[in-house]
Image (cartoon, rainbow, N blue to C red):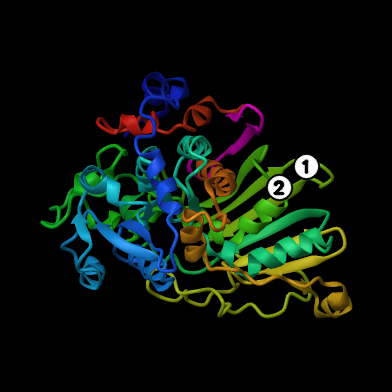
Amino acid sequence: MITRRSFLKTGGLMTAGLALGGLDVVNASNAASYARIAGANRKVNLACVGIGNRGAEIINEFDKTGLANIVALCDVDLGAPHTQAMLNRFPNAKRFKDFRVMFDQMGNEIEAVSAGVPDFAHFPIAMLAMSLGKHIYVEKPMARTFYEEELMMAAAKKHKNLATQVGNQGHSEGNYFQFKAWKDAGIIKDVTAVTAHMNGDRRWHKFDPALYSTRYPKAEPIPETMDWDTWLMATRHHDYNKDYHIGQWRCWYDFGMGALGDWGAHILDTVHEFLDLGLPYEVNALKVEGHNDYYFPMASTLLFRFPARKKMPAVDVTWYDGQNNIPEVPAGYGKVEIDPNIPPVAGGALKPASLNPGKIIYSKDLIFKGGSHGSTLSIIPEEKAKAMASKLPEVPKSPSNHWANFLLACMGEEKTRSPFEIHGPLAQVFSLGVMAQRLNTKLLFDRNTKQITNNAFANAWLTQEPPRKGWEQYYKL
């Protein structure tokens, strides 16, 4: 295990050594030339990396738009039961275990890429895709580390002709358009505090927490069908164990972003964008239940503090996760059962909890209650909502769902609603929150220099560990 001292000596403060430079765009004109092709039957040639579980759901959504031609399927475990459905559905798509081989062998046939893979694996796929002139769609959160998110935003800015999209689909549903309309109309204004909460069961965590509180899982035989080395990508080596796999990667600091990255992207996305929050100046771990160095706590309360922006006051955002870590709700909050508008996730519905995943927004004059994903806001209590009804603006309908929005953007017909430039700073908020969880401490952050000012180790940890040998080039694209 890498200690703080050894990290600071060998890998810390490596930002100067990892810069945007090196490989440049090889096929940057390909995507742009494809987009100029006219015709009623126009489809985007889409390569899909990650084809089981959530990856399969993403492929299904892209296919339902009628705008995608699935030309390649890539997964490190093509022989696994959870990958068979997509292989059977698209028998003519070329098959690969390694996305690098896929690009080498058929890069000229690919216009866009979807990455339905674990959080830590988004970065190399996205960076290589952009360097080759491919549009890129990644699941949320955008990446795992603050520095990777910084590089992805810089690469997207460099390749402005490419469409980028992060998979927080609420950005193409009612929540997005209502929040924007209410903000523009002055209904949402002078917000000073937000409570965000996800208190459902830990659906990605199936092992006894005491088992790994002082160590990583022991080595088990790698499934014969699986390319474990490619699954690890740029992260340092871990021996295979079933408790890393099939969604459980999300609970490990080395691979996932926990409840915050998983659900925060669906709960705080519109708050962050339309209140122009940017990056916090302070992140404080107020509660970390079951803290250890390996996996996420069983419950946590995190305070993010954002300064005044333009004419908007300072905002405190408090995040609660854990089944018994329920925030207080204001009088007149109303029903607390699971919102039927929240879609099934990872193949199953969320189990009922004490409070529906969502948010409470406190402004000078009004309190708003909101859910997750595309769920819209309501004003509470009900009496206040009735008094405000006549003042509420008309909310426009979405012209396209999130997957069609991406494909239409690939064609040059729309702009993506959750591009890297929009989602990137929110993902960095999550990365700072995860660091506060992992170190169980308060972090002071300079928004201008993007440095942590009160903790040298945490500041070095913005880059995390150096990439594994053979993966360094993705940090130089």
Image x and y of residue 416, in percent: 55, 55
Determine the residue positioned at 35% across, 58% down: 46
Distance from label 1 to label 2 (Cα)? 7 Å
Image x and y of residue 236, in percent: 29, 37
Determine the residue positioned at 65% across, 48% down: 303
Image quadrant assignment for residue 280: top right
In magenta, the rendered stretch is: 436-451
Dot 1 and dot 2 residues touching (CB under 8 Å): yes
Determine the residue positioned at 75% across, 67% down: 368
Determine the residue positioned at 75% across, 40% down: 307
On screen, 12 above or below 192?
Answer: above
Q: Mark number for residue 309?
A: 1
Element under disc 1:
loop
Is 398 left, or right, of 465 in this rendering?
Answer: right
Which quadrant of the rendered structure holds the N terminus?
Answer: top left
Is 277 left, or right, of 452 in this rendering?
Answer: right
Which residue has dot 2 on it? 276
Is residue 75 a member of the stretch shown in magenta?
A: no
Q: Disc count in the image?
A: 2
Q: Amino acid at mark 1?
A: Arg
Image x and y of residue 359, in percent: 66, 64
